[in-house]
Each structure stands twice: as structure tokens, then as C-alpha cells.
Amino acid sequence: MAQLTLVEKHQNTAIALAVHAFTASGVVLAMLAAFAAYQRNWTEFFGWLGVALFVDGVDGPIARRFAVERRLPTFSGASLDFVVDYVTYVFLPAFAIVTAGFTSTPIALVLAGIIVFTSAMYFADTRMKMKNNAFRGFPAVWNGVVFVFFVFQPPAWFVIAVVVALAVLTFMPVAFVHPVRVERWRPLTLAVTAAWFVFASAALAFRLDPPDAVKIGFALTSAYLSTVAAVQQILERLKL
């Protein structure tokens, strides 16, 4: 019986470590993305970040499915996830802002500093989730924001305005949707999220210069995901 218990303990540890290793693979993907950015290969850069986004999207459900926290309580998957997310969602997109030439280098460095600083403060805030599982404030998804910049190539003033506005919204009690965990309008939100990934993949396939039809679909789905939780928040306050 003791031998069986020991075997089960090792199996539990192995399963949990395998799931954590899958999460940690996001850092390797981030390294590959950083090398692509160094080479100014932005299509490859966002391709690696896209794979990292996929890993981040499925590692949580996998961890819950295998009860990883119970199998290996001495290892913090949440802390590991924060490390990976900060590099892929924040640091590398900020680096891309500096090196891509959207603005002058001094301004780009200021914008990147704003991004990494406000996001670090946000990641440490234990109130980042609302009761309905929406994010409180802009959830530091700078990988998506910077991807939009690369697809649409907006003027410098627009890039500056968006970065500053989202940095302020990081600390405001404005809701941003979690596509999976927010129950209200979930089927519609999941459908729009799937469409967003299709348009984003198409933009990558066209090397960040897609036809107008792809740009329109990408813009509409991005607008929905950016504003739907705030709209729901207003409707809830109006009891609608």
C-alpha cells in the first residue's frame, strides 16, 4: 500500500510538472520572438507571440482539468504564468514599439516605459478581476494593441494617444472582457474571438499588409472585444 502511494505521488508530480513545463514553454517562444524582433522580422515576431498566446489560452484549462495545484502544491503555476504573460503580453510588445519606428526613438522609449511600468503595477493588483470575471481596467494585453498598430500603421499621434489612454484605463474601474469566463453574451463573444483569430492569422499570412476586407473584419472584432465588457457594465448599472 505504501509502495502504491509512493507511485501515485510520483505520477502526480510528473503530471503537474508536465503541465507547468507547457506553461513555461511560453518563455522559449518569447525568446524566439525577441530574436525575430532583433532581425526586424515582424511577421515572425507576431507568429511566435501568437503561439505563446495559444499556450496561455489552453494551459489554464489543462491545469484545472488535471488538478495541478492539488498534485503539486509547492509549485505556483500562477506565478509562472505571470512571468510568461509579462514577457509576452508586455515587455516584447513594448520593445517592438521602440524598434518599429512608429514615433521618434525618445518618444517611443517613453511610451515603452509607460507600458512596462503600468503593466507591472497592474500585474501586482489583486483586484484585477471583477465579480463577473471581467478584468478591472485595461488588462495589459499590449501584444494585441501593438499588433493592431502593425496592421494599420497609424500616425504617430494616434499611437501616442492610444498608449496613454490605455495606460490610464489600466487603473480605472472600467471592465474589459475575459472571452471565456464572462458569462453574459459568452456565445457571441467566443464567436467574435474566434473571428478575431481568423482575421489576425490572415493578417500574418499577408505579412501584416492584408487586403481591406481583412482589415475591416479585424477592426470590427477588435472594437467589439475592446468595448463589450464596458457596454455590459453600463447595462448592469442601468439594470438592463
Image (tube, rainbow, N blue to C red):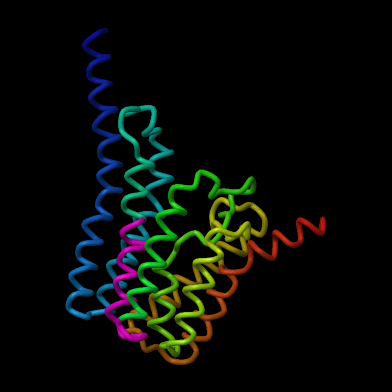
Q: Is residue 135 magenta?
A: no
Q: What range is drawn magenta here?
A: 86-105
Q: Residue furthest top?
A: 1
Q: Residue furthest right?
A: 239
Q: Which of the 4 image quadrants contains residue 67?
A: top left
Q: Is residue 99 magenta?
A: yes
Main SS, magenta region, reads helix
* Residue shown at 25% from the left, 40% from the top: 18
* Residue shown at 36% from the left, 85% from the top: 102
Q: Which of the 4 image quadrants contains residue 197?
A: bottom left
Q: Which of the 4 image quadrants contains residue 168?
A: bottom right
Quadrant into which the N terminus falls: top left
- Indicate whether 229 appears above or below 83: below
Out of 35 and 159, give the one closest to the viewer: 159
* Residue shown at 60% from the left, 71% from the top: 224
Compared across the picture, whether 144 is left or right of 8 comes to right
Image location of residue 173, percent across then percent down: 63, 57
- Indicate whether 123 appears above or below 54: above
Image location of residue 119, percent across then percent down: 42, 59
* Residue shown at 38% from the left, 40% from the top: 63
- Indicate whether 240 appears above or below 227: above
Compared across the picture, whether 182 is left or right of 62 comes to right
Image location of residue 180, percent across then percent down: 54, 54
Image location of residue 92, percent across then percent down: 30, 66
Q: How many marks?
A: 0
Compared across the picture, whether 190 is left or right of 86 comes to right
Quadrant into which the C terminus falls: bottom right
